[in-house]
Image (cartoon, coloured by chain):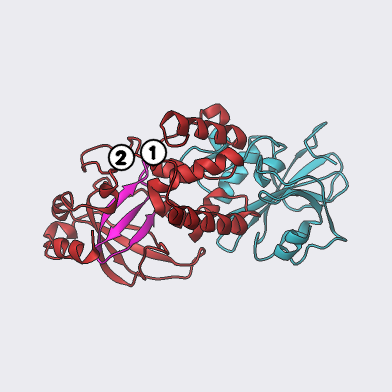
Chain colours: A red, B cyan
C-alpha cells in the first residue's frame, strides 16, 4: 500500500482520553535504514508489525511511512501487554541521544486502546505478505517465512548487509551488542524474506543469525542442551528450514 | 594479527601472539571459563549458553555471577600469584561487559577476540575504544588443567 493511502486511513483516528492513562515505557527506537525515516522528536503513530514473544522488542510501521525498531533491552522492561501485532501505538520521542550504536533514540511509548481497534483493520506491509494475524492471536505462534529463491534485489541487499555486519561484529563477544548494530537490525527489518537467506548462510557457515531467526519466526528449534553450541544450533535451524519448506 | 592490531592500538607483535585459528564455536566469556565448545552469552531469548543461576542481563553482575559458578571470587588486581588463576572482565564506558580474559601461568593473558583467534597478550593491550577497560578481577585456586592454560 502506498504511504499516502495509509496516511489517509489513519490520519483521522481520534486521540482518546485513555491514551493519557495508557502505560508509558522508556525504550529505544532505531531508525531502520533502507525503509525508513528520520525519526524526529514528538509524537508518532504507527502499527506494530511484530513483537518478540517476550515483548522485548519489535517493529512499528509508522503512519508517516517507514518503520522504527523499538526495544526495551536497555531498561530491562517489556513492552506493555496491550501492544500486539496489528495494533496502533503512539510513540513519543522525548530525547535523542548519541548512544551506541548510533541512531539510538530514547523514547516513551503510549498505547491507545481505542486507536488500536481501528488499526486492526489497517493493512500493513506484513499482512500484505500473508503474515497477518489478528490482534487477538498470540504472538508466540510461529510466523510465516519467505521461501527460498528470494528475488535478486532482496538477496543483494541482504548479502551487502550481512557482509557489513560480519565485518563490524567479528571482534565482538556480546551477541546482544552485535545484533544491535544497524546492519543487523536492518536485516531483521527485512522480516520473513530474510529467513531463507539466513538459513542458506547457516548451511555454509555457523554465523550468528539465531537471534534474528528467533525474532522473525517466533520459533526456537534448538534444545537446551545445544544452547551455545554454534554448529549444532546452525544445523538445527537448517533442519527447521527444511521441515517448514523454507529452504530446499 | 594485523586485523586485531587495527582494532586494538595497544596490541603489537611484541606483547601478543596468535594461539589458535579463527572460530565461531566459542567466545571470550566461554574461553575465560575454560569452555572451547560453547558461545557464552546472557540473553533473554535463551538462545546461547549462560549459567542458569547467573541471570540473563548483560551486566558486570551477571558476568561475576557466571564466573562465581566456577569458583571464582572478586579480587583486587591481576597480578600473578602462584597457585591462583585469575580472570579479568572489561567493560565499556556504560559499564556493559565487553570482554573477558584469563591469566596464564606465565602471567600473560589468553583471550578469544569474538570470532577471531585466541591470542596471548599483556593485560592492557586490549584496553581502548573497542573493549573499554578492565572493571573486574576474579580469582580461584588454579586447577590442575584448564583449556588453554599455556
Q: CA distance from mark 1 to mark 2?
A: 8 Å
Question: Would you call the spot at circle 2 few (<14 residues within 10 Å), some (14-19), or many (20 or more)?
Answer: some
Question: Would you call the spot at circle 1 few (<14 residues within 10 Å), some (14-19), or many (20 or more)?
Answer: some
Q: Quadrant of residue B135?
A: bottom right
> Residue at the spot x=32%, y=63% of the render?
A66
Q: Which residue is mark 1?
A: A218
| Residue A110 relative to residue A162: left or right | left
* Of A184 and A35, the residue lying toward us: A35
Which chain's residue wears label 2?
A
Q: Residue B17 at what x, y percent from top left?
A: 84, 53
Secondary structure found at label 1: loop
**From the viewer's perspective, is residue A96 above or below residue A52?**
below
**From the viewer's perspective, is residue A42 above or below residue A247?**
below
Is label 1 on the same chain as label 2? yes
Q: Which residues are magenta?
A: A45-72
Asked whether disc 1 touches disc 2, contact meaning CB atoms under 8 Å apart, the reply is yes
**From the viewer's perspective, is residue A2 above or below residue B46?**
below
Q: Overall secondary structure of the magenta stretch?
A: strand
Dot 1 or dot 2: first in sequence order is 2
> Residue at the spot x=23%, y=47% of the render?
A82
Q: Which mark is residue A139?
A: 2
Query: Looking at the image, how many numbered discs can be counted on the residues?
Result: 2
Amino acid at each position: 500500500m502506498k504511504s499516502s493511502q495509509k496516511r489517509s486511513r489513519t490520519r483521522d483516528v481520534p486521540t482518546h482520553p485513555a491514551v493519557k492513562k495508557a502505560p508509558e515505557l522508556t525504550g529505544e527506537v532505531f531508525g531502520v535504514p533502507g525503509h525508513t525515516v528520520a525519526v524526529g522528536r514528538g509524537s508518532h503513530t504507527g502499527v506494530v508489525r511484530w513483537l518478540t514473544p517476550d515483548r522485548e522488542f519489535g517493529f512499528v510501521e509508522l503512519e508517516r511511512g517507514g518503520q522504527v525498531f523499538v526495544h526495551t533491552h536497555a531498561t530491562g522492561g517489556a513492552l506493555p501487554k496491550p501492544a500486539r501485532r496489528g495494533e496502533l501505538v503512539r510513540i513519543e520521542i522525548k530525547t535523542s541521544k548519541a548512544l551506541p550504536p548510533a541512531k539510538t533514540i530514547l523514547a516513551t511509548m503510549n498505547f491507545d486502546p481505542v486507536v488500536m481497534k481501528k488499526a486492526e483493520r489497517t493493512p500493513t506491509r506484513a499482512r500484505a505478505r500473508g503474515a497477518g494475524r489478528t490482534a487477538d492471536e498470540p504472538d508466540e505462534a510461529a510466523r510465516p517465512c519467505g521461501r527460498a529463491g528470494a528475488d535478486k534485489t532482496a538477496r543483494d541487499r541482504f548479502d551487502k548487509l550481512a557482509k557489513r555486519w560480519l565485518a563490524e561484529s567479528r571482534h565482538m563477544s556480546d551477541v546482544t551488542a552485535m545484533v544491535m548494530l544497524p546492519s543487523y537490525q536492518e536485516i531483521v527489518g527485512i522480516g520473513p524474506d530474510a529467513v531463507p537467506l539466513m538459513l542458506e548462510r547457516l548451511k555454509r557457515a555457523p554465523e550468528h543469525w539465531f537471534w534474528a531467526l528467533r525474532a522473525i519466526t517466533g520459533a526456537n528449534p534448538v534444545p537446551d542442551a545445544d544452547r551455545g553450541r554454534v554448529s549444532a544450533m546452525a544445523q538445527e535451524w537448517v533442519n527447521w528450514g527444511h521441515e517448514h519448506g523454507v529452504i530446499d | 594479527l594485523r586485523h586485531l592490531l587495527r582494532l586494538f592500538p595497544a596490541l603489537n607483535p611484541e606483547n601478543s601472539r596468535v594461539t589458535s585459528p579463527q572460530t565461531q564455536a566459542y567466545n571470550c566469556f566461554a574461553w575465560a571459563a575454560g569452555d572451547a565448545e560453547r558461545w557464552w552469552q546472557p540473553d533473554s531469548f535463551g538462545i546461547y549458553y549462560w549459567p542458569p543461576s547467573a541471570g540473563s542481563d548483560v551486566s558486570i553482575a551477571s558476568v561475576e555471577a557466571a564466573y562465581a559458578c566456577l569458583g571464582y571470587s572478586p579480587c583486587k588486581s591481576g597480578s600473578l600469584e602462584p597457585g591462583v588463576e585469575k580472570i579479568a572482565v572489561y567493560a565499556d564506558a556504560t559499564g556493559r561487559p565487553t570482554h573477558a580474559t584469563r591469566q596464564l601461568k606465565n602471567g600473560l593473558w589468553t583471550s578469544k577476540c569474538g570470532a577471531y583467534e585466541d591470542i596471548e597478550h599483556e593485560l592492557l593491550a586490549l584496553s581502548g575504544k573497542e573493549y573499554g577497560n578492565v572493571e573486574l578481577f576474579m580469582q580461584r585456586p588454579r586447577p590442575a588443567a584448564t583449556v588453554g592454560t599455556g
